[in-house]
Amino acid sequence: MLFNLKTLLRSAALRQGSRLAVRNFQSQPIVMGISQPEFHQSLGISSTVKSALLGIKKCGKSVQSNVQLKGRHLLTLKDFTGEEIKYLLWLSADLKYRIKQKGEYLPLLQGKSLSMIFEKRSTRTRLSTETGFALLGGHPSFLTTQDIHLGVNESLTDTARVLSSMTDAILARVYKHSDLDHLAKEASVPIVNGLSEMYHPIQILADYLTLQEHYGYLKGLTLSWIGDGNNILHSIMMSAAKFGMNLQVATPKGYEPDPGITKLAEQYAKEHGTKLSLTFDPMEAAQGSNVLITDTWISMGQEEEKNKRLQDFRGYQITMKTAGVAASNWTFLHCLPRKPEEVDDEVFYCPRSLVFPEAENRKWTIMAVMVSLLTDYSPQLQKPTF
């Protein structure tokens, strides 16, 4: 009886702690300049325990969601509703809190294996996927162009069928998005886009989780993209409006986002009552923005265009002058690797730069993707307000 009472009390305290964590959805809170230790102190440990004890009878089962993603492919966020994307962020925060903050061991992917096809080199995508999948008890297998010649020595169809017979999911980082479509058509397991020339959905999940942790909400934020109309921008355009976020885009002439994607993004903005603007003026795009975002101007495979691109992107570097026209609570994001011509050191290393929490969140979000596609696990934390 005493053992059962102790277990009940501990469970109630954990649930109450979970609610407090999700209330701000921040693992490293930045609230009016308060540090994490001060933030925790301000919560009042004794009051937390007291609330947990008083609330024992009020604690029910963990919150369940009607969203079911098991067995799905993740090729682009265009294919996911706002609620489905929010679910992935909720699950990301849940795993981050339970594993990083509470120190729990969650072998949710024990007995599962993952094929990781990489035509392009990577730091964050590879490391986040390998360590995240292994941390959940699964076995990732890294396959480069030296290990597997996708569509060369073996057809895409044959590759998809063979890998499907040996692993439970395939993450592919490729040049052509059409290769992902082909893999998804032929595979019998979930395919996850680790990056293509058209989209980079798993990066955007990390971006949104980072902003949710920092601001405590996403709805109503204004994002400013200043740079190339590339795969990162495309993924933002396919998802921002679904959260009620506005998007202001500045690209040089000739580097605009894909016209088809722009048309669909305009439709999303109309449906969700948000604003989407495209300009060639970086300062105009930064006006009143909460989040300044940029990326490399020279992606892998574009090295021969370097000199022309550097010339075409003159004036697009994000500096404190750019931030000067943004909102008073502005922050900065960059998916990395970063080059100084894209953003100067003063912005990149300033306290408002979220690039390193953003990089870490690549791990928690890809873990959430894998868990949602391969298991029936539901988040234990209370669902946040987006």
Image (spheres, rainbow, N blue to C red):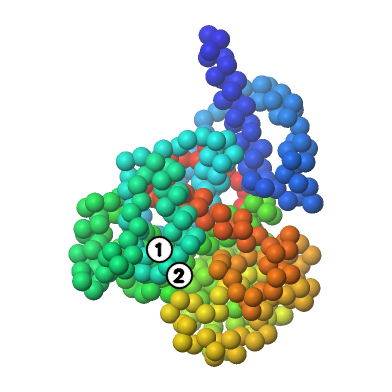
- How much space separates mark 2 and mark 1, taking CA atoms? 8 Å
Can residue 382 be spotted in the picture? no
Rendered location of residue 264, percent (x, y): 49, 74
Q: Are marks 2 and 1 in contact (CB under 8 Å)?
A: yes
Residue at the location (35% across, 57% down)?
A: 142
Say what amino acid the circle numbered 1 marks: Asn
Q: Earlier in the sequence, mark 2 or mark 1?
A: 1
Rendered location of residue 337, percent (x, y): 55, 68
The residue singled out by tag 2 in the image is 199
Question: How many numbered callouts?
Answer: 2
Say what amino acid the circle numbered 2 marks: Tyr
Residue at the location (73% across, 63% down)?
A: 350
Residue 272 placement, left or right of 352: left
Quadrant in which residue 175 is drawn: bottom left
Can residue 107 be spotted in the picture? yes
Q: Which mark is residue 193?
A: 1
